[in-house]
Amino acid sequence: MNPTVAGLLQALALVGALALSYRPLGDYMAYELTTRKHLRVERGIYKLIGVDGEAEQTWAAYLRSVLAFSFVSVIVLYALQRLQDHLWLSLGFPAVSPSMAWNTAASFVTNTNWQSYSGEATMGHLVQMAGLAVQNFLSAAVGICVVTALIRGFIRHKTDRLGNFWVDLTRLTLRVLLPISIVFALVLVAGGVVENLHMAQTVHTLSGSAQSIPGGPVASQEVIKELGTNGGGFYNANSAHPFENPNPFTNWLEIYLLLVISFALCRTFGTMVKSQKQGYAIVSVMGLYWMASAALITFFESRHSGAAAQIAGAAMEGKEVRFGIPGSSLFAASTTLTSTGAVNSMHDSFTPLGGGTAILNMMFGEIAPGGTGSGLYGILVLAIVTVFVAGLMVGRTPEYLGKKLGAREMKFASLYILATPTVVLVGTGLAMSLKAGHGGGMANTGPHGFSEVLYAFTSAANNNGSAFAGITVTSNHWQEALGLAMLFGRFLPMVFVLALAGSLARQQLTPETTGTLKTHSPLFVGMLSGVILIVVGLTYFPALALGPLAEGLH
């Protein structure tokens, strides 16, 4: 079959599966986030941690709970790594170094899953299961908790209460993420992904040499790695490794998993605000950007620039033959437009404009559809900015979902938009100017070397986790700098989102009039798409011009 036709069929099947999942999964999450019923196991958890399941929190208390839980999670995960050599199933691996343990703890707690180590040669099975896989569940749930609080800010009136973080976290983990993960882990095992507690097995190859084959609980970690938009691989090669992603079917399934919750949350949003048209408007913008990105990367990677690409028929360097250009490009677009960061090909070997598109995807704030929760609250903040811009055009106070957007709300929205680019651009600038950064890890010079550093900080601050592999980040400088970028990039935006939610919840409902902007119309979809492009373009274009654009035009 023609590769182009095969790629198109693969994309159409993916769109169909996501469309079929949109309503049932979205409505199910909305129900679980609004029901007053507690399961017996949940009541036991609340009693164990000393939480009143019926009490609700202000935005400040909700934020303190998010930060406290995340702080404790970093400490626990750091301790597990540092004590690894004393733990069961350590496989004989030594304790992880302090700087690497810090970087990894910050990475997995922030849903980034940036890895500066080779998983199969660094982490024992217990640390993989009880440390990394557990955070894959919890960090994904935290993102959904925050967007749930924002939605409550829209639908509640004259109150300072946004729900209970501990209840939301428990329900999302036990009722949503865990059941889906169990089902699809079995599907992945049936598809050829390994799942065992074996130590590395030594085998003899056809050439007569010995080779070590590492096993492990891969399928159970692979499923939540994708479903929770985490991205950390059990193996160093991530989803390019045949034990994690054996064939085109598992590749397609993993792309589906990393997109399904983030897209379905738009249905959850529409259900909770009692207007499915609002959800359709948001998901339309997400879908447009996702399809455009996938098409662009496929186009750039299919070009025959250079002798090697002409012989192969496309830019096949760094890509698995079993996936080809369509499977690799669709995966790359999906993983960089979400906060997943899993890779089934080497992004550093992409064409300049193909790799540049991947960087741009993350610079959008990973909102198409973005991470679990973080993508939806990111695009809702941009929707607020769009309504504000429209209000300026017609000279009236902007309103969104019955809430007026005054100076206080716009300050929080503006701070949200500025937070992540500040971390990215300041971090990149310092890395390029300081000897510890410029000379301590860059394998390339010129525009491509700059692109590697820009990609690293964009990935860390946007909590993506993928990387251009040409940059070595194992030094203490890189471990600490990128760890800080992950923490600031994750929690600073959450502060402004929850503050915005609290401000909205305190307002009374503003009745819709003939002058109210229809935020579910095609006009609004176009305006929101344009605002996203303009905001990202004005913010990042100079940096892109120094890196991938300069390299692509060279």
Image: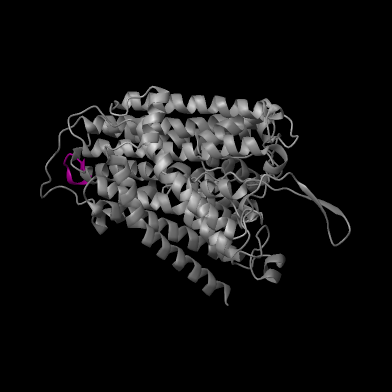
- In which quadrant is the C terminus drawn? bottom right
- Residue 119 % position (x, y): 67, 42
Q: Is residue 394 magenta?
A: yes
The residue drawn where x is 23% and y is 32% is 505
Taking depth in this image into account, of 322 and 476 the one nearest to the observer is 322
Q: Does the magenta stretch include residue 320?
A: no
The residue drawn where x is 38% and y is 54% is 286
Q: Residue lying furthest front in this view?
A: 40
Q: Is residue 401 left or right of residue 256?
A: left
Q: Residue lying furthest bottom in this view?
A: 1
- Residue 200 % position (x, y): 75, 46
Q: Is residue 297 left or right of residue 165?
A: right
Q: Residue lying furthest top in this view?
A: 50
- Residue 170 % position (x, y): 40, 35
- In which quadrant is the N terminus drawn? bottom right
Taking depth in this image into account, of 497 and 539 the one nearest to the observer is 497
Count of marks, rendered view: 0
Q: Which scheme is used to colour this image of the protein?
A: one colour
Tell me where residue 24 sits by quadrant.
Answer: bottom left
Q: Give the range drawn in magenta.
A: 393-400
The answer to whether residue 539 is visible is yes
Q: Is residue 201 left or right of residue 159?
A: right
Q: In this view, does 317 lie to the left or right of 544?
A: right
The answer to whether residue 169 is visible is no
| Picture layout, residue 7 above or below residue 279 | below
Tell me where residue 284 sits by quadrant.
Answer: bottom left
- Residue 472 % position (x, y): 69, 39
Taking depth in this image into account, of 70 and 295 the one nearest to the observer is 70
